Image: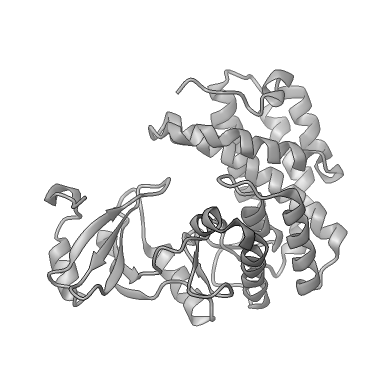
Amino acid sequence: MTPTPHDLPADLDVFLAAAGWAGATVEPLQGDASFRRYFRVRKPGDKTAMLMDAPPPNEDPGPFLRAARWLDANGMRAPHILADDAARGLVLLEDFGTARMRDYLDQWPDDETAIYTAAVDALVRLHDLPPGPFLNYSMSEYQREARLFTDWYCTARDLYVDAGGFSAAWEAVLGDLLPRQRPGVTVLRDYHAENIMLLGALEKQGLLDFQDALVGHPAYDMVSLLQDARRDVPPELEARMIDHYVRAAGVDKDTFLADYARLGAQRNAKIVGIFVRLWRRDGKPRYLELIPRVWALLERDLAHPALAPVAAWFDANVPTALRESLGGRFEA
């Protein structure tokens, strides 16, 4: 499909010409859960680049540009920035091709261990770096994200819950973790099989969707990778990858597992809320079908003793029938 003129960003021809891509064809690609749009830009001779359209006021490409340049300068494989006009929300990027980790594994599942090992090794390299120039993953940010569960999921279910108790439970659970994320590592926050590109060799991980990077705990991106909302990761593979990370990073396993469960529960509660918000606010009901997978992971995390205060809140506030049906189905 070739986009019609009104589908393209305003004055795109001017931007492409200034970047040295005059006369290139522009092909729309599937978008994500944000207001951003993506296009593949193709010159004669099949030279390609990616175009990000992140239009203000809903989007701001500035954080993406800062994170991409920091990652690139520190040896991580973020796409090179070819040109940008941040005020108009336009960024021309290196094209990482089509070998997305998720799609590769759908076709060659026997390579799962090797592919996930390489993805964990990329995190080890990232965590060996000094933390990037990003804000800290603070308690207030953890709480803001966790409240997406009560603000959106519980509201959609007409559940009248103890919001103050919810915040207090997370304060108790995460307060013990905060000292262990100082000085911290760069946390990409959405590191999973649909945001990792395979660049010709298993050990080369092309990174995408890192504009929300913060400085936080090393377990967070391990949760993103191994408790994937969009893909089933076998529990035995998850356990092997955690063991691999613990050995490579030289951290205490029991402490890491407790923090992994803490951040897993926080992230999965947040994602349930986000998926409901995408349906109710943004008109994207397709994310509702992913809730049962995320809810099952949430329940597993809540079973860890480190989550006792939050688990008690769920016991008191979320009906058993909903929990047994993994969040239940919505009529979208």
Query: Can you say whether 291 is above or below 18 in the image?
Result: above
**Closer to us: 120 or 68:** 120
Question: Would you identify the image quadrant in which residue 271 lies?
Answer: top right
Quadrant hosting residue 144: top right
Q: Is residue 197 above or below residue 274?
A: below
Against 7, residue 166 (above or below) is: above
Q: Residue 229, position in %: x, y?
A: 58, 45
Q: Position of residue 153 (x, y in %)?
A: 57, 29
Residue 301 appears in view: yes
Taking the spot 25% from the left edge, 60% from the top edge, the residue there is 88
Q: Residue, x 80% and y 42% (percent of image)? A: 307
Q: In this rendering, does residue 148 appear at all?
A: no
Is 285 left, or right, of 257 in this rendering? Answer: left
Q: Residue at x 20, y 72 (%)?
A: 43
Residue 226 horizontal side relative to residue 172, left or right = left
Residue 288: % across, % down:
51, 32
Q: Residue at x 34, y 70 (%)?
A: 93
| The C terminus: image quadrant | top left
Number of labels in the image equals 0
Q: Position of residue 63 (x, y in %)?
A: 43, 63
Q: Give the colour scheme shown.
A: one colour
Q: Is residue 70 left or right of residue 32?
A: right
